[in-house]
């Protein structure tokens, strides 16, 4: 259920509405908008008619919307204004489109520093890199672990770029929280509800990737697990889905961008690297993502993709990445945004 307060409702009226929700067995999640306050009521059931009635008659309440609770906090009905996630001063969800770039895996000091300097020089605003890798084969490189996190922190120290890194397992949460500026939840973990709830209890911004067989509706419910624990800084990431097509690694669901923009206030980050799986398609799909309304971009960049331990085939060399940044700035401007 969503309670929309009148614009100009006073704080006492808002408190009264929240207290009534609690008496009725709901947990209130207030959002103060520019014009009015909206209070999401989280409970197990669809708003019962008698509860809707009890809240509708309170002073200062404009209307009560009895919607299904599946992705209430993530919905536009609940919060009409775009959410802006602030990552150490970089805003995701505003007019500017931040670009997150870096290697798939952190491999060595030399590799990470070289890539970090190059992407910074080209205008990227955050550094990505996996220290814990979700590999399809248990025999493949699994990541450098804490050593990788330390290298990311070293790269942040030198470049000033905030770091985005994947949290693969709840048991790593403490160490990842210590180093990361953004917690990435990978496609394979996007429906790991226990992990989603744990990161929801933290205050760190989260980059939640779409699972490879997750519908848009399910994707929003994954985000809801994080939001309902009190962490409002969630960015959704479209990274391609499994289809019958084999010419590309995944089918990059460009449709998801405008659909999500309509249904949720959360910012949408596009990942054309995993979305296509081939470096030569990354630039065109980046430009398409910006044109479609993406609020951020995440791209894999490697100084020597031929010998990368993971995802070399979809990684751009620094020079190609710098060219991409120039083209992306032109498209962003054409659609009224800025890179
Ligand atoms: C990654 O970002 O390197 C990654 C493993 O992505 P995904 O979870 O989308 O496959
Ligand atoms: Mn990767």
Image: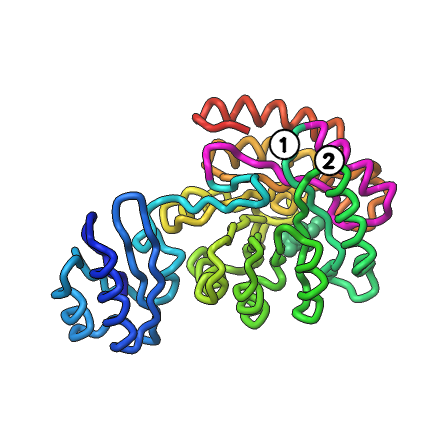
Residue 254 or 48: which is nearer the viewer? 48
Q: In the rendered image, is residue 247 in sight? A: no
Q: Callout 2 environment at 10 Å: few (<14), some (14 to 19), or many (20+)?
A: many
Magenta residues, as a range? Answer: 94-122
- Label 2 and label 1: CA atoms lie apart by 9 Å
- Rendered image coloring scheme: rainbow
Q: Could you tell me residue 148's position as x and y percent?
A: 80, 54
Give the residue drawn at x 56%, y 40%. Answer: 89
- Which of the 4 image quarters holds residue 139? bottom right
Residue 103 or 124: which is nearer the viewer? 124
- Which of the 4 image quarters holds residue 189? bottom right
Quadrant that contains the C terminus? top right
Give the residue drawn at x 73%, y 62%. Answer: 136
Q: Is residue 223 above or below residue 27?
A: above
Residue 179 or 329: which is nearer the viewer? 179
Quadrant that contains the N terminus? bottom left
Residue farthest along the front direction in this orientation: 12
Ligand 2 lies under 8 Å from the Cβ of mark 1: no
Disc sitting over residue 334 in the figure: none
| Cβ–Cβ under 8 Å for marks 2 and 1 | yes
- The earlier-in-sequence mark between 2 and 1 is 1
Give the residue drawn at x 15%, y 65%. Answer: 58
Q: Could you tell me residue 282's position as x and y percent?
A: 64, 36
Give the residue drawn at x 46%, y 61%. Answer: 227
Q: Which residue matches tag 2? A: 316
- Which of the 4 image quarters holds residue 321? top right
Disc sitting over residue 283 in the figure: 1
Q: Could you tell me residue 65's position as x and y percent?
A: 22, 61
Q: Could you tell me residue 6's position as x and y percent?
A: 18, 52
Query: In the picture provided, is 22 more to the left or to the right than 85?
Result: left
Q: In the rendered image, is residue 127 in sight? A: yes
Q: Is residue 213 above or below residue 53?
A: above
């Amino acid at each position: 259920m969503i309670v929309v307060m009148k614009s100009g409702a006073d704080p006492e009226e808002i408190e009264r509405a929240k207290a009534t929700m609690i008496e009725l067995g709901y947990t209130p999640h207030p959002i103060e908008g520019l014009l009015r306050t909206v209070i999401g009521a989280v409970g197990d059931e669809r708003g019962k008619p008698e509860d809707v009635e009890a809240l509708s008659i309170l002073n200062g309440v404009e209307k009560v919307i009895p919607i299904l609770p599946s992705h209430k906090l993530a919905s536009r009905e609940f919060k009409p204004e775009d959410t802006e996630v602030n990552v150490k001063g970089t805003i995701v969800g505003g007019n500017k489109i931040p670009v997150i770039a870096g290697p798939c895996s952190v491999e060595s000091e030399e590799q990470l520093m070289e890539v970090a300097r190059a992407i910074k020089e080209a205008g990227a605003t955050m550094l990505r890199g996996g220290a814990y890798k979700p590999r399809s084969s248990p025999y493949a490189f699994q990541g450098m672990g804490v050593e990788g996190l330390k290298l990311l922190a070293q790269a942040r120290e030198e470049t000033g770029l905030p770091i985005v890194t994947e949290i693969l397992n709840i048991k790593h949460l403490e160490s990842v929280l210590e180093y990361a500026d953004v917690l990435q939840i990978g496609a394979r973990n996007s429906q790991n509800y226990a992990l989603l709830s744990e990161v929801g209890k933290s205050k760190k911004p989260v980059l939640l990737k779409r699972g490879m067989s997750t519908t848009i509706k399910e994707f929003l419910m994954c985000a809801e697990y994080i939001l309902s624990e009190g962490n409002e800084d969630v960015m959704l990431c479209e990274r391609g889905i499994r289809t019958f097509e084999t010419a590309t690694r995944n089918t990059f669901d460009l449709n998801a961008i405008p659909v999500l923009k309509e249904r949720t206030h959360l910012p949408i980050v596009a990942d054309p690297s995993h979305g296509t799986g081939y470096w030569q398609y990354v630039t065109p799909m980046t430009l398409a993502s910006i044109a479609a309304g993406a609020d951020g971009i995440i791209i894999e960049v490697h100084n020597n993709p031929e010998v990368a331990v993971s995802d070399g085939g979809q990684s751009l060399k620094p020079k190609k990445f710098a060219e991409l940044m120039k083209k992306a700035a032109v498209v962003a401007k054409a659609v009224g945004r800025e890179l």
